[in-house]
Structures are given as structure tokens and as C-alpha cells.
Image (tube, grey):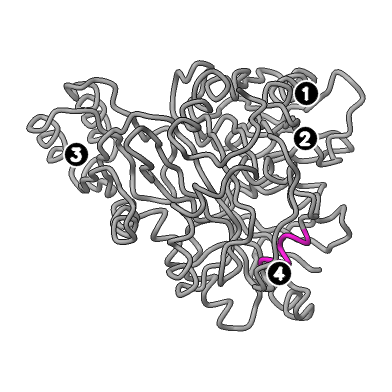
Amino acid sequence: MRILGVGDDLCLGSVYLRLCQEGHEVRVSGTSADSVGILEGLIERSDEWSAQLPWIRAAGAEGLIVFETATHGAVQDALRAQGFRVIGGSAWGDRLEEDRDYGQLLLRQLGLQTAATHRFVDHTVAIEFVRRQPGRYVYKICSGHSASTRNYVGQLDSGEDLIAMLAIERRRVGDVPPAFVLMEYVAGAEVGTGAYFDGHRFLQPACIDWEHKRFFPGDLGELTGEMGTVVSFRRSRTLFERVLAPLESSLENSGYVGWLNVNTIVNERGIWPLEFTCRFGYPGTAICGTLQTDAWGTVLRKMADGRGEAIRTRDGYAVGIVLTTPPFPYDEPRCARVPILFRDALDPLDGQHIHLAEVAREQGQLMVSGSRGYPLVVTGVDADLREAQRKANRLAAQVVIPNLRYRTDIGDALIREDMRRLVAWGVLDEGPDPAL
């Protein structure tokens, strides 16, 4: 096949490399200035993705365009109307992810329970709201371009810490604040469920995932996009039927084709959907790939064909760890181009458990590139969650980059208590669980 990858920062580098190894023709185009240099020397790049449309058109049904973002949905809809096979999302999917209170409204209309969500466009008004109705709230900006570090989970029942944070945000944004929501905090175990949607239905099986968003071990520090995740394609039927399946007709009507994930909190009162990811997530996509026995080209083709074909997957767990360097989790114009080295003789391009992101190759040497300090992800896979975690941590220890930072506790909370709680609350399907 011919595949054109389009993304702000080209976060799916590991997928594109695997597609090349499978024998497909791949070109990529970064839409952000921050993508300059990413994947240089590894994959053919194009400064303007639209200039590659004739190349894709000439391939007919063998041509695919893959969008990574939740901000190009209208463009994807237009390309589909022109006869292109496009995987990524839709304009309606973009709205689900960005307009958080709209997403919550849809979930309520479909019969799911949601936390009370309050929309604002003025930080002063939001501060007065919290003073009148003290409590723990989660602050989330309604924008696909907002940094995860600007979201905030209130810690005090009085709301004093949230008020202080809102005052900081008010000074930061000045007279043109973005829309944002305050969502009432729900305690419980956090778990997500996601699946590939082929334009008509979700392809089975769905996955379940446990994200770790805080910067430091023990869930301390800033909220990042994600520092690591545990994924499995087993025991997901209950979550799928209760959370994802009700969305199928709406997704089909919108022309959606791509990955969709819903993050939830589960407690003794049930499942509380929190937010949508209407695009390929990272590092989730790379981690899921380690459990898929179908090649990436096959997975993309099944989505594009729209025939409801199942995705072949293996048993067990995959643990993924994000390896970062400064300035992560913040942005700078350019990261320092430093070498990526390994203690043992490893092939970082084999794509099995080393997944490259913001990297380039210069004179045969892999280098950190881009602007975020997000060079790669490592994974470990095993039927036993503890062993999958050990494998991932052992592989992370083989990577040597100046000022490398990562978490070593991905999966600890799941092993310690969350798996037991999810079983007790009836969310996970029946089956042996090596994590218990």
C-alpha cells in the first residue's frame, strides 16, 4: 500500500517505521513547526501533505491517508467526499474530544451516567462559582491544542487550591481565555476502553487500558499527556458494551473511521465516562501494537475496508513506559540534539519493543529531535502483569540519553488494588487474572 501520515508532531513514528518494514510505501508530513527534523533520515518527509495527494490517488484502493490529530476532522471528511480512503476521525469526532461538555451531553443522552460538568469562558466567573459551591473539581480546557500540563485535578474539598490555579490561568491567558469546564471529581479506579472503528462498527476485540498521566512515580507532579500505560485486549467485553457500543450509530452517521477511546472512572456506583480520545493516541497506539498479531498494514486495511473484520490479538498485558528528556513536559523551540544510545546491542528499529517518536537519524546515529523531549517508548509483554512490568523496566534501563527521565512504577496501582476493585465492581469479564 501507499500510506501518507499527517500529524502535528508525527507521534506515530514507530507505526510508520513498521509499515515500511512490512513493505509499504510511506511518506509523512508534519503540520506543526515543532515537527521539523522528526523522522529525518528514517522516513521520506513532505513539507506539504496536500502535495502528496496525487501520489495517493494514483494508488487507488491501495492508497491510505492517516491523520494523527483531532483537529483535521473537517479536512478528512472533505477528502473522503473526494474518494480518498482516510483513517483518523471526523469533524464530529473532533468536537467530541475538544468540546468536553458536548461529549458529556452525548453520553447522558445515550443513557450513561456522567459527573456534573460546568462550562466557562471567564476565570473570574469560575472562581466565584467555586466559592459559592466549594468542592473538588477537575479543570479541563476545551481545545485540541492545549497542553496537558494546564489541566488540573483539585485536591481540597474547600476548592482553595483550584481557585488559586484559576487565578494563575487568568493571568496567563489575559483578555482572551479559552473555553473550559469544571467537572465534579469522582473517586474510583481509572480505566479506559478503546477500539478501531471502520466507518460502520467497532472492530473486535476492544482493549482496556490504564494510563499514568502524572510526571513522577507515585502519581506526583504535573499532568502530562501520558507517562506510561498498561494495555490488554482481553476481558474487555463488559466495558465495550456499556461504553463504546452505544456510540456506533452516531460514529457511523458522522463518517468516522479510526481509533476511539473513552476514559472512565469506575466505582461502586458504576461507570463514569470522563473524556474522549478521537484519534490515534500516543503512546497507546504503539503499546497496542505489541499485542496485535495482525501487521499494521492489515489493521489499517481492515479499518479502511469497513467489513467488520476482527483484529487478531494475543493474550496478556503490554506495559509501556514513555522515556523523556528536557524540556518535557513543556515545549521549547527545539530540543537539544543529543544521541540515543543503548547499553547492550539492541536494534532500535526492529519496532518490537522500542518505539521511536521524536527522533532523527544523522550519519547513522539516532538523535533526539522535535521540541518536546519525547524520543521513545519501551514496552514489555507477558501473560503476567508483574513480568510485563519487569520486562519494560529492564528495557528502559538499557537506554542511555543525557538527562533521561521516566517512571518505574507503571502498573503498580493496578497490581496493588485497582484490578481487585474492578473485578469486585463487575466491570472486567470473567477469566483468570495473573495480576491478582
- In the visual, does 161 lie left or right of 422? left
- Magenta residues span 297-303
Q: Which of marks 4 and 1 is in front?
A: 1
Q: Earlier in the sequence, mark 4 or mark 1?
A: 4
Q: Nearer the viewer, mark 1 or mark 3?
A: 1
Residue depicted at 66% across the width and 20% down the height: 404
Amino acid type, mark 3: His
Crowdedness near tag 2: few (<14), some (14–19) or many (≥20) residues, C-alpha within 10 Å:
many
Q: Picture quarter containing residue 279? A: bottom right
Q: Kindly identify which residue carries mark 2.
A: 354
- Contact? badges 1 and 2 (CB < 8 Å): yes
Q: Which mark is residue 64?
A: 4
Q: Where is residue 40 in the image (x, y as percent from the top left)?
A: 77, 47
- Work out which residue is located at the far left of the displayed protein and give it: 132
Q: Nearer the viewer, mark 2 or mark 3?
A: 2
Q: Earlier in the sequence, mark 1 or mark 3?
A: 3
Crowdedness near tag 4: few (<14), some (14–19) or many (≥20) residues, C-alpha within 10 Å:
many
- In the visual, does 312 lie left or right of 270? right
Vertical relation: 74 (above or below) 20: below
Indicate the secondary structure of the residue bearing disc 4.
strand
Q: Kindly identify which residue carries mark 1.
A: 395
Q: Nearer the viewer, residue 198 or 434?
A: 434
Q: Residue 123 carries which label?
A: 3
Q: Earlier in the sequence, mark 2 or mark 3?
A: 3
Q: Where is residue 47 in the image (x, y as percent from the top left)?
A: 67, 60
